[in-house]
Structure formats: structure tokens, C-alpha cells
Image (cartoon, coloured by chain):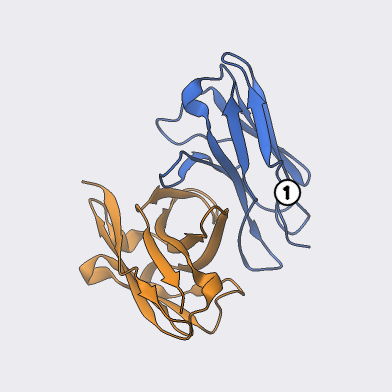
């Protein structure tokens, strides 16, 4: 079954850390760029990070740069997001998404179901 | 300023044609591809249009995309009740060096 499944979301205090995981199945994970995209409650979508094939390139939105780290383990078909120094404004549903290989950057053709991260004291 | 601007809401009656606009700048829409997403309530977004006007397999041809200069549009013809959703445009931004999403448009089918 072709799918992405996120996990690791939780309630955490401001300043805390969390690691999100995304398990891929049904396709050759190593062939694709992957991204994390989040959506605060009742708000729109915000792209936060991507990682290229073979982890050659990574990039981050300014809102998370220096605090979040994206990584991947192609042997385990998994994508990760290490989130440090969490802030209340990081509260959101976090989606992992696969980038359509034949399109420009920003064409996410597969999404997970999302995992909720709540940052609150 | 690196922002993609969409109208917050749009509406139409069944069978009608509706368009949703997305306005950007030279650093995003003006120099890069535009993508459109549909998000039904409580679900993850779905890619509707990529590279300005291309449709992924399975997306009906009632959905079409276009781009002119620093603006883009999504058109939905033969509107149906199941098209009621939030719609987002997106594009790479050369200044931000990242993907920008528009604020989203909530489509209501009257």
C-alpha cells in the first residue's frame, strides 16, 4: 500500500524537544525529495523543510531555521523532523509529503495523515 | 514581499464555473511553477494542479489551472457539492529559497 504515516506528535512545554517520524511504504522512498509541512489549528499551510535524495540538500523556512532538523534513513524508508526549542506558535498538525518527481519544487503528490504537536505550558 | 494572496472565500451553485485567483510577485509566481491543492474538511491536502496547468492522474478535467505574469488561477467547472473545500496555491520563492503557500480560499457550494 502506497502511503506515508507520521508519528511522534505530543503535548510538550515551551522550550522542549520532539522528534517526528514518517514511515513510507509502497514506493521507492530513496528516489524522492521529501518535505515537512504544517498547519496551525484553523490556519493555512506552511512549508517548513525539505530534504533531497541522498540527503544532499536540506532547506528550512525562516520560522524554524536553527531549531528544526530534517533527516532521512533510506534503509528504513523513514523521514524525521527533530524539533528543538519549541514555541507556542509551533503548535500545528505536521504533515510529511512526497514531492512529485516530474514537477517543480512544491508539487507534493502524497501526504501523510498528519501528527498533532501541541506546545503549551 | 514574499506572499501569495488568495481571496478568503468563493462560492457558486451546482453546475456553475468558479475561479480562484492567486497573486504573487516576480520572485515566486513570476519565475516559478504554480501548484494548487484541495483540502477537504479534516483531511490532508490533495494535489490538484502542478506546473501551472498539469493534472495528476485521477484529477478530473473539470479542474484547470492557468498562469499569467505574477498571477495564477484555478477554475472549477460543473461545480459539485463535493467540491466544497479549502483551496491553496503554492509556488517556490527565489527570495525565501522555500515553498510559499497562499492563505487559502474556502469554496462554498450554495
Q: Is residue A73 left or right of residue B76?
A: left
Q: Quadrant of residue A36?
A: bottom left
Who's orange, chain-wise?
A
**Which secondary structure lies at badge 1?**
loop
Observer-nearest residue: A117 or A76?
A117
Horizontal and vertical percent position of residue B103: 65, 50
Q: Residue at x 40, y 55 (%)?
A: A98
Instruction: Relative to B62, say whether A102 is above or below.
Output: below
Q: Is residue B23 left or right of residue A109?
A: right
Q: Is residue A81 visible?
A: no
Horizontal and vertical percent position of residue A46: 56, 60
Tag count: 1
Observer-nearest residue: B77 or A86?
A86
Instruction: Relative to A74, say whether B30 is above or below.
Output: above
The outermost residue toward the top is B15
Who's blue, chain-wise?
B
Q: Residue at x 45, y 30 (%)?
A: B59
Residue density around tag 1, few if under 14, some if 14–19, many if 20 or more, within 10 Å:
some
Observer-nearest residue: B53 or A94?
A94
Instruction: Relative to B32, say whether B63 is above or below.
Output: above
Horizontal and vertical percent position of residue A41: 51, 57
Q: Quadrant of residue A61?
A: bottom right
Q: Chain of mark 1?
A: B
* Residue at the disc numbered 1: B5
Q: Residue at x 52, y 78 (%)?
A: A87
Q: Is residue A68 visible?
A: yes
Horizontal and vertical percent position of residue B96: 67, 68
Amino acid at each position: 500500500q502506497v502511503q506515508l504515516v507520521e508519528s511522534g506528535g505530543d503535548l510538550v512545554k515551551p522550550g522542549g524537544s520532539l522528534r517526528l517520524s514518517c514511515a513510507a511504504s509502497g514506493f521507492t522512498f530513496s528516489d524522492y525529495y521529501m518535505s515537512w509541512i504544517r498547519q496551525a489549528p484553523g490556519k493555512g499551510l506552511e512549508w517548513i523543510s525539505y530534504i533531497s535524495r541522498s540527503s544532499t540538500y536540506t532547506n528550512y523556512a525562516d520560522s524554524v531555521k536553527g531549531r528544526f532538523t530534517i533527516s532521512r534513513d533510506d534503509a528504513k524508508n523513514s523521514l524525521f523532523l527533530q524539533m528543538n526549542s519549541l514555541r507556542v506558535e509551533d503548535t500545528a498538525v505536521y504533515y510529511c509529503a512526497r514531492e512529485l518527481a516530474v514537477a517543480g519544487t512544491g508539487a507534493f503528490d502524497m501526504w501523510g495523515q498528519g501528527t498533532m504537536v501541541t506546545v503549551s505550558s | 514581499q514574499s506572499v501569495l494572496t488568495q481571496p478568503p472565500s468563493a462560492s457558486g451553485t451546482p453546475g456553475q464555473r468558479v475561479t480562484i485567483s492567486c497573486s504573487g510577485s516576480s520572485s515566486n509566481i513570476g519565475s516559478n511553477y504554480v501548484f494548487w491543492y484541495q483540502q477537504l474538511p479534516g483531511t490532508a491536502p490533495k494535489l490538484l494542479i502542478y506546473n501551472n496547468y498539469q493534472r495528476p492522474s485521477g484529477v478530473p478535467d473539470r479542474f484547470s489551472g492557468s498562469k499569467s505574469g505574477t498571477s495564477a488561477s484555478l477554475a472549477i467547472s460543473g461545480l459539485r457539492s463535493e467540491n466544497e473545500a479549502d483551496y491553496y496555491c503554492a509556488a517556490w520563492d527565489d527570495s525565501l529559497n522555500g515553498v510559499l503557500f497562499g492563505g487559502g480560499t474556502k469554496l462554498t457550494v450554495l
